[in-house]
Amino acid sequence: MSAAAASQGHRRVAVVGAGITGLAAALRLIQQHKDLHVDMFEASSRAGGAIQTEHRDGFLIEHGPDAFITNKPGGLQLCSDLGITDQLIGTDKQHRRSLVVHRGRPVPVPEGFMLMAPAKPTAILKTPILSFTGKLRLLSEIVRSKKSNDDDESLASFVRRRFGTETFERLVQPLVGGIYTSDPERLSLKATLPRFLEMERQHGSVIRAVLAEKRSEGNDSQLSESGARYGLFATHATGLSSVVASIVSALKSSGRSRLHLNTAVDAVKPSHERTGGWHVKISDQNQMSFQGVILSTPSWVSAGILQTLDPILATELSTIECASTAIVTTGHRLKDFTHAMDAFGLVVPAVEDRRVLAISFSSRKFTGRAPTGHVLLRTFLGGATQPGLLDLSDQDIFEIVAAEQQQLLGRSQKALFATITRYQRAMPQYHVGHLELVNRIDERLSRQRSLELAGNAYRGVGIPDCISSGYTAADRLSAELSN
Ligand SMILES: Cc1cc2nc3c(=O)[nH]c(=O)nc-3n(C[C@H](O)[C@H](O)[C@H](O)COP(=O)(O)OP(=O)(O)OC[C@H]3O[C@@H](n4cnc5c(N)ncnc54)[C@H](O)[C@@H]3O)c2cc1C
């Protein structure tokens, strides 16, 4: 294929890493650029990376991500490009709310409270989560003066400054910290939730901005359309691995793509100084040549692959810390709990000093995740704030999860099954200064022709961000190859 392709003037590119980023990049290259051939290299025995769905005894288990946000374009765009939008489902309307642990018991997050923005100030007044002074401090945000400079700031600093310590510790830290599995004292607001900085800048207050947004919501037809259809999150009816399978099948049926499983790439080096191009080194004996390369491996893996080519770029990439996390999935009879599980899940503030970060009630969030009368739970542990926990054995972790579920949800019986999936160095930490670091990485990378980096370490960790990152890398690479 390769010799024939070359002789017919086809250009060959390599995509390294077959997680959702690499798969999206390969799909984009194949769909948009009919003269390209794509070879994908994947170290493990399957495509999908963090995405991994398992069907077991009538339960649908997502070992990694279980949904994607619909107010960012990447996820819906990919499904539209695959022609599978009709296979997506939204969250179950019946249980659309979240709980936060307060003094050892789950309490509803105040209605309308979005990450850090209270869209319904009256709900704040009623919540038992905050003290009277905590509530006043939160609501006084509306009259607080705004920051005078544009410097990056941690999430913790921003929320304390605007809403006070209690709101930070009791609501924002568990709601936001959980998404990034990060230490909010180090998490860059600019790199993760720039929308809130913009609100402060434009309206002088987050609350004022949210209320203004609410008033004009009806005018934003696109947002309300996807919102009405799926809620804020969507997933595939038969699990996210079905999206992966659709991409793999589209790539295969194009006849212009090959997926090399169990094939780890060690290094990328220039193949020809004058005309450009790359050797992709698979082992000491084996290398292949390509006109362009997209590295969609975790940043610390990409650092190793680029070490010889550009040690400065490799050092910058290594600076991005990545936290490890674990998900314990358990199946139960609903009647084995005293809690009604009438929510999507619960988050745990660090000040509660417990051993789990969050418990997602998966089968309450999406239909088809558990047989009738049963419930599927996903319990999250580890992250930047609980590093030592992942050193424990599986059995020790199962015992911790059982004890926490018993105390928080009134679980009385053994789980029908329990599985654990550990994600080592899988969650990039966007620390204060992250965007400047990514700009420096971009600058170093721009010195290399037809070499691109994509993935969750740069401009967004969620699935839609990864897809957009893969699409952008594909478009940039094909533009460079056309020049
Ligand atoms: C536990 C967990 C839960 C999450 N939940 C959500 C969620 O619900 N919604 C959401 O939007 N996001 C979620 N995320 C974030 C999101 O899932 C990830 O950021 C995204 O899937 C990462 O995709 P990726 O392709 O960039 O990286 P990965 O999925 O890590 O893929 C990288 C691939 O590169 C391969 N590779 C590594 N080294 C080499 C090498 N040398 N040569 C070749 N291949 C190599 C790996 O085997 C892997 O397949 C979650 C993440 C985790 C870890």
Image: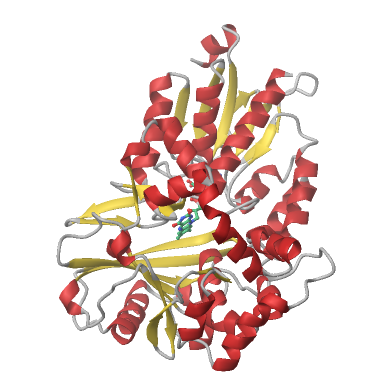
Q: Is residue 120 left or right of residue 210?
A: left
Q: Is residue 304 left or right of residue 252?
A: right
Q: Quadrant of residue 360?
A: bottom left
Q: Residue at x 70, y 63 (%)?
A: 197
Viewer-side residue, 177 vs 218: 218
Q: Residue at x 50, y 44 (%)?
A: 221
Q: Quadrant of residue 368?
A: bottom left
Query: Quarter holding the C terminus?
Result: top right
Question: Residue 287, how many percent across, how many down?
Answer: 59, 29
Q: Quadrant of residue 59?
A: bottom left
Question: Residue 182, how many percent across, how many down?
Answer: 58, 69
How many numbered marks, from 0 up? 0
Viewer-side residue, 295 vs 367: 367
Viewer-side residue, 32 vs 263: 32
Viewer-side residue, 172 vs 204: 204
Q: Residue at x 37, y 70 (%)?
A: 345
Question: Residue 374, how many percent across, how many down?
Answer: 18, 67
Image colouring: secondary structure
Q: Is residue 287 visible?
A: no
Q: Is residue 449 left or right of residue 359?
A: right
Q: Residue at x 19, y 69 (%)?
A: 416
Question: Residue 329, how many percent across, how many down?
Answer: 32, 66
